[in-house]
Image (cartoon, grey):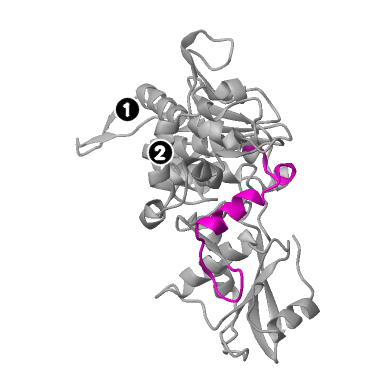
Amino acid sequence: MYRASDETIAHLIAAGESYRCEFKSDFSSKGDGKEKICRTICAFANDLNGNEEFGVIALGVNDDGSPSGLTIDDELEQKVLSIRGEGKILPFPSFVTVRRQHLGQAILCIEIQPSISTPVKFDQRIWVRPGNVTHQANAEEERRLNEKRRNKDQPDDAQVLEGFHIHDLNLDYFKNQYVVQAFAPDVLQANGRTQEERLASTKMAGQGRDGVLYPTVLGMLCLGLSPADAVPGAYVQFVRFAGDDETSPVLDQQEIHGNVADVIQSTEAKFNAHNQIPIDFTSQDREQRFSQYPKVAFQQLFRNAVMHRSYFGSNAPIRVYWFNDRIRITNPGGPFGMGLEEFGQPYAVGYRNPNLAGALKDLGFVQRFGAGIGLARSELLSNGNPPLELDPSANYVSMTMRKRA
């Protein structure tokens, strides 16, 4: 990941606060200190001026440029890095934290790269920094952010699908349900934003080479009337086998189609229907109920598969195969932005589909980022299941839950 030189950072700080530099004397979860930092991260990522230059928040520097004496340690750095998992900045931009020296004292620099997928939102609002002050974007600034995206630089989920039309999207669902969850009330009440502009702002649509607005991959996944027409692998194959391998008789099978919310809800309903709860009796004759598999563990692993699968590299669906002794969830596309040996580690977080991740957060299917596998492991342990088994490769990720004994 890009890291600026000491000389570049020193020059930016010496020049004072600007559209690329912000001073913060401390980092506090109380009040609005942390919130202001998040707004500024969002604003630097949006790069309204279009200079394609990183921005820096100098943490531990007073407004007049003097060191504040803030203690720079691992705890502070972890607090800053934890912003990644909160899911309030969407899609999450690229940034690093670097400890540096300023006038003989330690400071912590948060260095933010311009996003390739603007506009970036914090707390359901778009923030920009045209000068030395961060403010909420107005309608014209939001339009500029929509227009500055370039398809060739976009992640897969933001690619424009010129072979489809805006009317291939469920526009009533977008207007009456999705935008209510994706935007803050004051943004929705503001005048000057058409439905087309909101489709562009949420990455559900984008301009084609002819300047016409078309659905994106994200738009078809979230709003498409028939998503698999545009993204052939955008469905789930659920199979319940009577035995321990794929040659066993099939008890139940279904191809689950629809927008991403329908697919998640229908698949999880299918899981709940098959997840029988045996009854055990303790020595005190008190009834205890344990499911074969913990519901939360399945939710976390399945939603992780939906979020991180490759929608361009393979036409295969996500496969949920339920055997007598285990459930295996397989999604196309290997781990993104990390090595195979890093997959499943707490520090390893990569987003092949950053806009889809944001949409799942808006829809309420994701609360925090980077915690799903860890939470699934914890739930399996609490329920008495064997440990989670991970089998990542260059072309797929397979996750297996073993049945509770």
Q: Residue at x 43, y 36 (%)?
A: 174
Kind of residue at disc 2: Lys
Res 201 visible: yes
Secondary element type, mark 1: loop
* Foreground tag (1 vs 2): 2
Give the number of the disc on residue 175. Answer: 2
Q: Are marks 1 and 2 in contact (CB under 8 Å)?
A: no
Q: Residues within 10 Å of mark 2 (few under 14, many from 20)?
A: few
Quarter containing the C terminus: top left
In the rendered image, residue 395, in percent from the top left (x then y), is placed at 72, 31
In which quarter of the view is residue 205 placed?
A: top right
Residue 138 counted in the magenta span: yes
Between residues 380 and 38, which one lies in front from this camera angle? 38
Kind of residue at disc 1: Ile
Residue 147 to residue 210: above or below: below
Residue 151 to residue 11: above or below: above
Between the C-alphas of marks 1 and 2, the distance is 40 Å
Task: State the residue position of label 1.
Answer: 277
Magenta span of residues: 129-157
In which quarter of the view is residue 347 placed?
A: bottom right
Secondary element type, mark 2: helix
Q: Residue at x 57, y 89 (%)?
A: 68
